[in-house]
Image: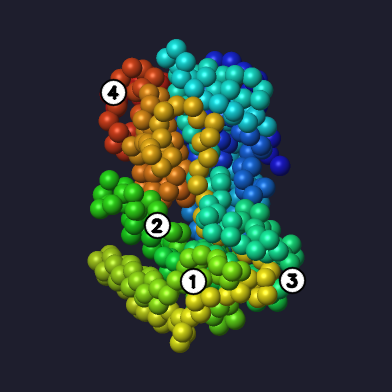
Amino acid sequence: MARHHVCQPAGAVDVVVIGAGHAGLAMSHILSLGAIEHVVLERGGIANSWRTERWNSLRLLTPNWMTRLPGQAYSGSDPDGYMSAGAVADFIADYAAHISAPVLTDTAVTCVALEGGCYRVATERGDWRCRAVVLATGAFNTPVVPLVAEAMPAGVQQLTARDYREPGQLAQGGVLVVGGSATGLQLAQEIQRSGRPVTLATGEHVRMPRVYRGRDIQWWMFASGILDQRIEDTDDPERARRVPSPQLAGTPDFATLDFNVLRGEGVEIVGRLMGVRDGKAQFSGSLRNVCALADLKMNRLLASIDVWAERNDLSGQIGPAERFAPTNVGGSPRLGLELGKHVSSVIWATGFRPDYSWLDVPVFDRRGGLKHDRGVVDAPGLYVLGLPYLRRRKSSFIHGAEDDVRELGAHLACYLDGKKAPIHVAAVQFDGARTRRSIADEVG
């Protein structure tokens, strides 16, 4: 495993970056290029969540050629394949070594507070004082488990997607997977193939083919500029940030994974889990409608890709336009399922949320969400990275960090130099020969 530079604990720096995942390390690189003194604090090891909080068979939903960070791109022999979680962790660790990131591992942050015009970042290994803080702990810290979980019968095993590793850890018997996005579908397929009967409960979801007209769907999203769409150009930014992840899987055969595929393998698809009463799960009757809406949105996306391909004269380089069979929900999806008798385990694939419980700064809204404008938090010198659609549709992807850290890094440099920076600073370019002062002059 790659070695990384480790700074000594406790002291004073210009910036503390919290989190040594891909986003935090990308920001570290940009800060280093701007000659900004900083430290990166990580509660575990580098890329901790990729090594310790993923199921065994997980692979990226994006092809390897899209895996890149500022100053380092994928260089392996399988650009069209999909990295395993372990390979992603190795890529990020190699990146930390490549950029000589000043990372302090096994240093959990316990509190961040404003004191005397600067921030105090308390850790289990001493305190740091700084003028700015970058929150790069990501969006997937705490599994979201609905309140209905409390009504599950005591004998039913319950796991979140973070707890799950492989089918062998599940009790024998039927499994209810709750959640119809990428994680839910992948786990449902894997568990069904292990010989356990699976029922999958779903609400709103995003359906996509893995390959369209001979190219990976992510190639189309990347090449056509869809992934570069900015949050300020959306009609409803808050809703855009809550859109579920697409139904995709990264497999060697580039196979599409959707409800039709799962039904063909024996998985039963039902509507959203609405409640549990007298030991029986109750499902919504809206399955047909939500599936029809997902089909409609998929076809709109494919139609927009067709228009873009025609405008860019790609007809000789790609296959013909395609449309896919509508989602088959069957004749009458069940509305109830007896737990315990037919279900021994429940997997909550219902998403994640960030954890800022250690952030003692008044920057939260009534629902507990972080108040920020495209990564600039509602407090002086406080920034956030790695959230879905932070600045662009690609913000939570590994390759999406580069543009975000360049823009937010420029804003941060202006803040440190006492200048008012425009929040939209896409044109700023960093390079190692420039100082923090010269960068700030360019965008001030």
Of the numbered discs 2 and 3, the one sitting upstream in the chain is: 3
Is 179 located above or below residue 365 in the figure?
below
Do the CB atoms of the residues marked 3 and 1 lie less than 8 Å apart? no
Q: Which mark is residue 283?
A: 1
Q: Which mark is residue 420?
A: 4
Is 117 located above or below residue 385 in the figure?
above
Numbered disc 4: secondary structure: loop
Counting from the top left corner in percent of width and height, residue 149 is at 58, 58
Q: Which residue is drawn at 40% across and 31% down?
A: 363
Determine the CA span between mark 3 and mark 1: 23 Å
Few, some or many C-alpha atoms within 10 Å of disc 2 (few <14, some 14-19, many ≥20)? few
The residue at the far front in this view is 278
Snapshot colouring: rainbow
Whether residue 119 appears in this view of the structure is yes
Q: Residue at x 65, y 63 (%)?
A: 153
Of the numbered discs 2 and 1, the one sitting upstream in the chain is: 2
Determine the CA span between mark 2 and mark 4: 33 Å
Residue 337 location, quadrant: bottom right
Q: Residue at x 67, y 47 (%)?
A: 52
Name the residue nearer the viewer: 61 or 319.
61
The residue to which callout 3 is attached is: 172
Counting from the top left corner in percent of width and height, residue 288 is at 40, 77
